[in-house]
Image (cartoon, rainbow, N blue to C red):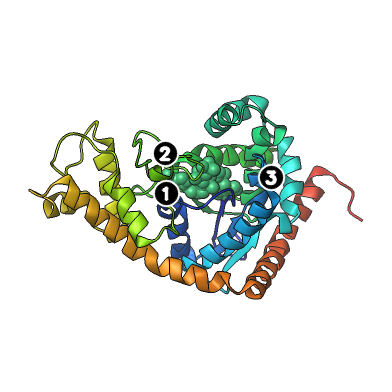
Amino acid sequence: MLNDQKVSFSGIQPSGNLTIGNYLGALKNFAEYTESYKCFYCIVDEHAITVRQVPADLRRRSYEMMALYMACGLDPEKATLYVQSHVPAHAELAWILNCFTGFGELSRMTQFKDKSQKHADNINAGLFTYPALMAADILLYQTDIVPVGIDQKQHVELTRDIATRFNQLYPGTFTIPEPIIKKTGMKIMSLADPTKKMSKSDENPNAVVYILDDKDTVIRKFKRAVTDSETCVRMGEGKDGINNLISIYSCFTGKTAEEIEREFDGRGYGEFKLAVGEACADSLDPVREEFARILADKAYLEAMMKKGADEAAYYARKTITKVRRKLGFVQI
Ligand code: ATP
Ligand code: LTN
């Protein structure tokens, strides 16, 4: 808690084009907190280099993410939007927290297991200690809530454990954060294999709907979405494809699953898929237009990045100074 105001913090890696999974599980929810919380939303480029990146792509995507944050309704006057590597305190606190994190704890992280399988030729120490950097991101700002998709729950729980352990040794250092995971949208599944999470690094472009896909592409991808051999639009066990489409439609329209089942009673999958595509495209159209407008003004984006980094550094310095003092580092 900063000056009695509660804090919301989250981060997204600039490691690929953002999907509707990133949008519905995280980004869309960020703006909700800007009125009542002090919000920090970070572009976590230091996390992204745990996997090899092409420098020009990483740079371009960092600008794009800044523009996308704003296009999704985040006002840089109300929320602190910034790039992680612009605030060196993240890396500093990450080192310190590494010394308070167990090897066993890190070994249990499912994201590490998944990513080391996917990138077997580059299982680096950063990929392994990634959660300590994420804990540093969150704890630097005395964060109360962390809006994320369900796949990040384990990392936020580890952050809580690290903070509790640190506080036991050095009382009153960190606020213990809580993950905020929305029931609908917390895990959007792949359109090609609805038993798998929709992921921005999926190689099959038909599996993923990108936030910046145009209307025709969105509709085409939903038309091809894998479903089952039934025809009735109804949630059910083993109906992963339809369950996923109902969740997506629910997120974009605000209708409940029951309302959706009633709306499509007696109508087939084809009609339903078209409606999901249209609802998704209609919601994303204004985001795409706004994104293009903001991205065209590089000077403005850089000015906003600088403003965000200065604000974040101001709050981060308070925590890092406290941590250094508590640990017994000499202050000069
Ligand atoms: P990658 O494919 O590179 O692992 P990713 O698509 O999982 O990336 P991240 O940058 O790791 O994206 O995640 C950013 C945010 O989006 C996190 O809060 C994460 O929980 C959320 N998120 C990612 N994918 C989904 C999904 N399919 N459904 C809901 N939320 C998601
Ligand atoms: N680990 C997250 C990205 C991330 C994050 C954070 C999310 C890095 N730091 C702090 C919330 C809070 C991911 O892979 N999606």
x then y, percent, for residue 9: 56, 56
Q: x, y percentage for residue 209?
A: 40, 50
Give the quarter of the image for residue 225.
top left
Say few, some or many: other residues with alpha carbon within 10 Å of mark 1 (under 14 / 14 to 19 / 20 or more).
many
Labels 2 and 1 touching (C-beta < 8 A): yes
Give the residue at mark 2.
197
The circle drawn on residue 117 is none
Q: Is residue 174 visible?
A: no
Name the N-terminal-most of marks 2 and 1. 1
Q: Along the polypeptide, which appears first: circle 1 or circle 3?
A: 1
In the figure, residue 164 lies in which quadrant?
top right
- Label 1 and label 3: CA atoms lie apart by 38 Å
Vertical placement of 30 versus 12: above or below? below
Q: Secondary structure at mark 3?
A: loop
Asked if disc 2 is less than 8 Å from ligand 1, the answer is yes
Residue drawn at x 57%, y 69% as measured from the top left: 295
Q: Which SS class for mark 2?
A: loop
Label 1 element class: helix
Q: Position of residue 13 (x, y in %)?
A: 58, 50
Where is mark 1, residue-wise? 21
62 relative to 179, above or below: below
User: Which numbered disc flags the more N-terminal residue, 2 or 3?
Assistant: 3
Identify the residue at image location x=35%, y=55%. Answer: 218
Query: Residue 245 location in percent, x, y?
Result: 28, 46
Residue most extreme to the left: 266
Three-letter amino acid code of the residue under disc 2: Lys
For the residues labelled 2 and 3, the Cα–Cα distance comes to 39 Å
Residue closest to the eye, 147 or 305: 305
Q: Would you call the spot at circle 3 few (<14 residues within 10 Å), some (14-19), or many (20 or more)?
A: few
Three-letter amino acid code of the residue under disc 1:
Gly
